[in-house]
Amino acid sequence: MDTRNRRIRPRLLAFAAAAFGLGAALAATAATPRCEQCIAGYYDCRAAGFDYDSCRNDLMFCQRANHCPMVEPPEI
């Protein structure tokens, strides 16, 4: 029986668990826009001259993607 495999397997499992944990931690702390940035993006979109519906759609997508409360923008 090969005892070398018995010593390597726990190390590989520990390394795999550490790599998975590091990846999960990095994904959880990834920089995502805050909810205020979604509203600011809406106003920037409108100031650039785009129509209400396309800017509203971008706002709703941003809010949904960032788990923000859904806020209807004012028509300006």
Image (cartoon, rainbow, N blue to C red):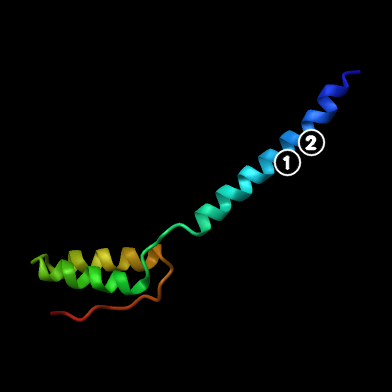
Residue displayed at 52% across by 53% down? 26
Residue beneath label 1, please? 14
Q: Residues within 10 Å of mark 1 (few under 14, many from 20)?
A: few
Residue at the limit of the structure toward the top, as seen here? 1
Q: Is residue 75 left or right of residue 19?
A: left
74 versus 26 height, above or below: below
Amino acid at dot 2: Pro
State the separation of the CA atoms marked 2 and 1: 6 Å
44 versus 9 height, above or below: below
Residue beneath label 2, please? 10
Quadrant containing the N terminus in the rendered view: top right
Q: Secondary structure at mark 1?
A: helix
Q: Secondary structure at mark 2?
A: helix
| Closest to the observer, 13 or 57 | 13
Quadrant containing the C terminus in the rendered view: bottom left
Amino acid at dot 1: Ala
Residue displayed at 16% across by 79% down? 75
Residue 6 position, x and y percent, is 85, 28
Residue displayed at 25% across by 65% down? 57
Residue 25's label in the rendered image is none
22 versus 7 height, above or below: below
Residue at the limit of the structure toward the left, as seen here? 49
Q: Residues within 10 Å of mark 2 (few under 14, many from 20)?
A: few
Residue 24 position, x and y percent, is 57, 52
Q: Is residue 73 left or right of residue 62?
A: left
| Closest to the observer, 10 or 39 | 10
Contact (CB < 8 A) between labels 2 and 1? yes
Q: Is residue 40 left or right of residue 11?
A: left
Residue displayed at 40% across by 72% down? 68
